Amino acid sequence: MNGAESLLRSLMANGVNVCFGNPGTSEMHFVAALDEVEGMRPILCLFEGVATGAADGYARMAGKPACTLLHLGPGLANGLANLHNARRAQSPVVNIVGDHASSHARYEAPLTSDLKGFARPVSHWLHSSSSSLTVGADAARAVQAATEAPGQVATLILPADTAWNPADDVASTLPFPAPALVSEQTIEYVASLVQSGVRTAFLLRGEALQEKGLRAAGRIAAKTGARLLCDTFAPRLQRGAGRVPVERLPYFAEQVVEFLSGTELIILVGAQPPVSFFAYPDKPSWLTPEGCRLAVLSHPHENGPAALDALVDALGVNTCVAKTSIRQPVEVSLDGPLDAESIMRVVAKHLPDNAIITEESSLALPFYGLTETAAPHDFLTLTGGAIGSMMAVSVGAGIACPERKVVNLQGDGSAMYTVQSLWTQARENVDVVTVIYANRGYKILSNELKRVGAAENGVHAASMFDLQNPALDWVALAKGMGVEAVRAESREDFEAAFASAMKRRGPMLIEAVI
Amino acid sequence: MNGAESLLRSLMANGVNVCFGNPGTSEMHFVAALDEVEGMRPILCLFEGVATGAADGYARMAGKPACTLLHLGPGLANGLANLHNARRAQSPVVNIVGDHASSHARYEAPLTSDLKGFARPVSHWLHSSSSSLTVGADAARAVQAATEAPGQVATLILPADTAWNPADDVASTLPFPAPALVSEQTIEYVASLVQSGVRTAFLLRGEALQEKGLRAAGRIAAKTGARLLCDTFAPRLQRGAGRVPVERLPYFAEQVVEFLSGTELIILVGAQPPVSFFAYPDKPSWLTPEGCRLAVLSHPHENGPAALDALVDALGVNTCVAKTSIRQPVEVSLDGPLDAESIMRVVAKHLPDNAIITEESSLALPFYGLTETAAPHDFLTLTGGAIGSMMAVSVGAGIACPERKVVNLQGDGSAMYTVQSLWTQARENVDVVTVIYANRGYKILSNELKRVGAAENGVHAASMFDLQNPALDWVALAKGMGVEAVRAESREDFEAAFASAMKRRGPMLIEAVI
């Protein structure tokens, strides 16, 4: 057994069995070991941002880490933006990054770089293996570090000689650390605040946004009238018919201010206090209303659903019935042009049970409410603002949940950053339907230009937001990567394409021209 | 005038007039300023790696920096791999990276990251502006830092408030620092070594590989019989008919050992001693032959051509005539399948005068010699090993030299990393002909797997090098981004396509199926 095989077996002994990779020469022994060891599924990505974004999506849906396999500093660098998003999503991810052999590191070879320097800003845990004899134990610890609540990015650097030299051991399985429990004192304190009768909102994040947590929060809300909120961009939210509805914070600072107006108490459950996404001249960054009290029920590393259950007990609301969304038929008028609202109506109408929606489009956001009463689904968004996330997240979500349909609502500008995701969708036959909101521009930016108080769009500025010259042909791009695609220019076309895509399996792209 | 306008005017006062950008909200005032100030050419890229790679290509050909415009930490992160290549190419590049407004930095907004941490591994110079009043002076210094010999990466972080607050000044023009001159003692010392009659090779890099330096080196070689060498991956080499020929070091360690065998003295002119690209078990990393002496004529920051001229004087070889390549007709046999050799024969035959060849294909490399006697051209390669370089470098080279044809010889695997380059080629009508070596695999890696002594290709390993499932359709991909494309499956097809592409202007892609 060499180090690579020890590493691979140790990853698997610790529950990691999917690898999103883009390897190079320094990772060849790891690649070779894939044929020595059964049970690790290697998934090739043609760009590292696809690998890291897919690992994020996988983690959000599987609740455990996949590993990535990346090639030296520059390979990791290409994956950093989506690791930033994974970090903000609190997704457990294990990066395996090949490095030059120890004996080669002293020479300034072309690919030599400050690998740890690249890794540090996104890694909660970072280590470079020093020997083939310890690489298995290092891998076990990397997995454990990734699974520390609420989920962390662990980066293990693998010098080539630690992969090719002999090893004699597979690391044992390390226990996954359970999230901390909130103290009784905290529960009592928060209960007393809630019982004081002030206008209260719970801001939920992490596991509290899944069914168990939501049911508890729903009981409290039913009794106390408290609002249930989630961040504009939450990693994962279970919603739709039969689920406890949660209000999503709007995107722009002034909308949030209005939305929270009158709130006297915000209780944070795994969330941070709301702040604006960007700063704007003369607009606030800190969005908690003046005079509103902030209280923490649970920190991100603590068990949010358990804390909500304990609060249910403390408030004596165990028998209260939470309000849930009731499935409602959606009407789609075929009158009028295809637009963001009609797209979302079609999605809401035809969404199958238990789908996964991934969303990275500023046009989709305002019509979020339309899917509230659609079939139950998981809803995943861009958590870290680094665009180019959901094309890749949709790949990982589909790999984690092969029996569920993934619907990716995607802006055309943002889709281009990790467009290579389509190839992996085709190769692995991932069941993702990508809807491109083809408005042929960075719409969000022409809005933002006005909002930051910059001058009116002149010709140069306008050119920086314009994707019309030339227009991207998404049907051709998808075809180029082996994904079936259609263009829809009317509501009728789009409904026909989407409804048909929901009834078949495998990747498909719909260019919705709006 | 606000900070953004002061910055923009200061960049221009210091000679920067091209901006490769992918801006976001925090850069909106910079974008707005583009309409207030005439003379900066903004070039939109759909992925940041295209912007940084284009800036590298621009710098190599223009000999001065362009600026990039990037969006916060993740935007910079997407550009890091090609900044690593630019650093290895010793290209002057000025990065302008927008950041959250100072007042917003204390909140943990989604896009908050360790921006300086991301920047440090690739930046020779790094600074975050603290006020709109100093941002112009900061920009002037950034340009000066970038132009320090041999060329540096300078990263200026621009908090949004330093762009939107008032400024009252445009920075003055700072002098570009000239490279240092080599001392007379060094010239005399190297001259004495050369005159000792040992078997000598000059390893040239940087400006020494352009015509002036090559002429001087050619005179020395003509008199002394010294070999003239360049690295496998040099940033820019002037070659072809009429130019002094230089031998390119082969790629693999054992080939280099044989190539340098018998060499008793290596004189470094702006180059480092040769080392292998990767380490392999039981193969050397350090490739200077045992007993061979190493001497430095000029360090990278010193003036190599001037040092060679001085050495010419010291050796008294001013009247020697350098050997130059003589243009030779190239024969292209139409018998046999399209392969890497016949592609290069066609390129050599039809290359127009003064073209720029960019190369990122392990298949093209062995046939390098075929273009030695073609029309004179500049030859640019992947300097830092971070693949995904030349698609973008070709954009920048074409922008720097609009009157010259760019021919990009590109592997299919590597082309995918920055495939978005095609869109910018179409938008800006850059005169680049991309030849895709479509062997539908990471050919280099299946070779490397054997070389590192890993096990025979099994099914999992083989799948990590295989781009056949599905095959990329490059004609469709190019069409998707507005670039005209054809597929060539025979020598006849390829020659017809390439010859026709050489006679027209504007971007074109040829998928050469081999």
Image (cartoon, coloured by chain):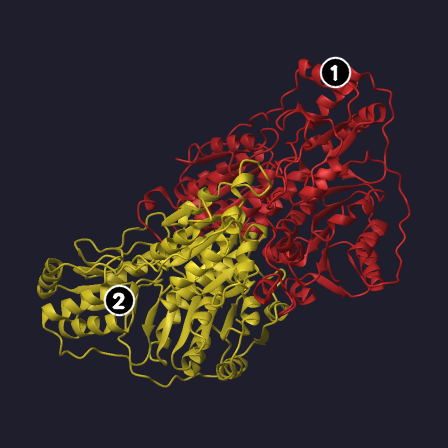
Chain colours: A yellow, B red
Up-down relation of residue A91 to residue A108 (above or below)? below
Residue ID for mark 2:
A208
Residue ID for mark 1:
B192
Task: Measuring from the top left, give residue A348's x and y in whole percent.
Answer: 40, 79
Q: Residue B211, can we see it?
A: no
Q: Nearer the viewer, residue A187 or B142?
A: A187
The image quarter in which residue A82 lies: bottom left
Q: Residue A346, can we see it?
A: yes
Q: Residues within 10 Å of mark 1 (few under 14, many from 20)?
A: few
Task: Measuring from the top left, give residue B53's x and y in whole percent.
Answer: 60, 47
Q: Nearer the viewer, residue B96 or A76?
A: A76
Kindly identify the amino acid type of the residue bearing the numbered disc 1: Ser
Task: Measuring from the top left, give residue B394's x and y in whole percent.
Answer: 68, 48
In the structure shown, which secondary structural element does the residue marked by tag 1 occupy? helix
The image quarter in which residue B132 lies: top left
Report the Cα–Cα distance between label 2 and label 1.
77 Å
| Residue under the point 43% across and 35% down | B167
Up-down relation of residue B465 to residue B146 (above or below)? below
- Hey, which residue is sitting farthest front in the picture? A168
Kindly identify the amino acid type of the residue bearing the numbered disc 2: Ala
Between label 2 and label 1, give the one nearer the viewer.
Answer: 1
Q: Which quadrant, please, contains the C terminus of chain B?
A: bottom right
Q: Nearer the viewer, residue A418 or A140?
A: A140
CB contact under 8 Å: marks 2 and 1: no
- Hey, which residue is sitting farthest bottom in the picture? A329
